[in-house]
Amino acid sequence: MKRIAQILFLSLLTLNSSLFTSEALAQCPVENTAFQSGERLDYKLYFNWKFIWKTAGSASMTTTSTTYQGKSAFQTDLITRTEKMADRFFQMRDTLRSIYTTDMVPRFYRKGAMEGGKYRVNEISYKYQGGKVKLHQYYRHGDGRISEAENVGTDCVYDMVSMVMRCRSYKSSDFQIGQRVPFQFADGASIKTEHLIYRGIKKFKVEDTKITYRCLVFSYMEKNSKGKEKEIVTFYITDDDNHIPVRLDLNLRFGTAKAYLKKATGLRHAETSIEQL
């Protein structure tokens, strides 16, 4: 099952109908229209314990300008931390970093994760030559074993972070309720295909405030080893040009959890999805 850090990034996926074909993701590079350097999103994580919702931890995501191999690029970092109460059930100390060009071509990805008392590392390096992309994938398992793989693709292949940041630039019009969105990403030493399902537009009122968000609602589906599909998370994404998640409902191995956006700074666009009551 995907961990909370991965699910937070999957929840950022806001795709339009042009992405429903495999050719759409092959169109590299693409213009970034959604975010800018200096953006920061902060979340609070909650866990349901004996029918009571308790604070479980926090997550923050930042995007900054950088250089990579002498060229201008973006760097996006996601850090997730559980608190002491949640550590008794599942300790999580995750740090993800993705570097990609200003026109959204992935170059490097790293995830270091202390989860459930075990430390794992996932690294991906990209090389482009002759119209193809070569991925070197390195994965350190929780027991210390190392898996490495060399994969070659003619389409754009994305890690969890760079794919999400690119997809934020797609428009959100022309969705049909129940429409399924396939996507591919490099994970560990392999490349996987999963699906999103569009559920429609709903309004979400932030507890103890007068703020209501107009949101696009999606479900992230995952298949188990027997091929049976399960809904892992339902998420609410702002219906504006920023395309940021404000609420996530998660079905995890150790129970149910929620994540709420608490603060957003450095946004590129006005938050037109907010309705003040």
Image (cartoon, helix red, strand yellow):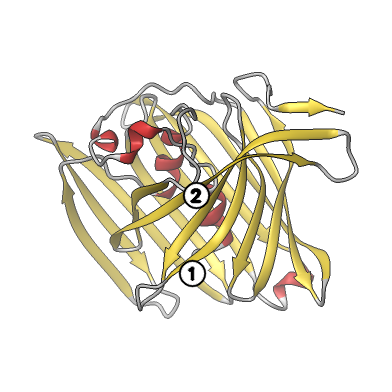
Q: Which residue is pictured at 46% across the width and 56% down the height?
A: 111
Q: Residue at x 50, y 39 (%)?
A: 76
For this view, does 166 lie left or right of residue 90? Answer: left
Residue 99 picture location, percent across and down = 41, 38
Q: Which residue lies furthest to the left in this view?
A: 130
> 10 Å neighbourhood of mark 2: few (<14), some, or many (≥20)?
many
Q: Where residue 53 sits in the image (x, y, percent)?
A: 82, 65
The image shows residue 147 at horizontal and vertical percentages of 28, 70
Tell which of 98 and 22 is nearer to you. 22
Vertical placement of 274 versus 9: above or below? above
Q: Which residue lies furthest to the front in this view?
A: 177
At horizontal 79% and vertical 74% (from top left) the residue drawn is 49
Secondary structure under badge 1?
loop
Image side of residue 201 versus residue 100, left or right = right
Q: Residue 122, image x and y in percent?
A: 39, 60
Disc 2, SS: helix
Q: Do the residues labelled 2 and 1 touch (CB within 8 Å)?
A: no
Using the numbered discs, state the Cα–Cα distance from disc 2 to disc 1 in whole angstroms.
Answer: 13 Å
For residue 1, which numbered disc appears in the image? 1
The residue that disc 2 covers is 10
Residue 23, picture quadrant: top left
> Height in image: 242 above or below 194?
above
Q: Residues within 10 Å of mark 1 (few under 14, many from 20)?
A: few
The residue located at (47%, 21%) in the rendering is 33
Question: As drawn, which residue projects farthest toward the right?
Answer: 208
Q: Which amino acid does label 2 sit on?
A: Leu
Say which mark, if any, is on residue 71: none
**Mark 1 residue type:** Met
Choose top left, top right, bottom left or bottom right for residue 270.
top right
Q: Which residue is at the front of the view, 23 or 217?
A: 217
Going from the N terminus, do you reach mark 2 or mark 1 first? 1
Name the quarter where the C terminus is drawn: top right
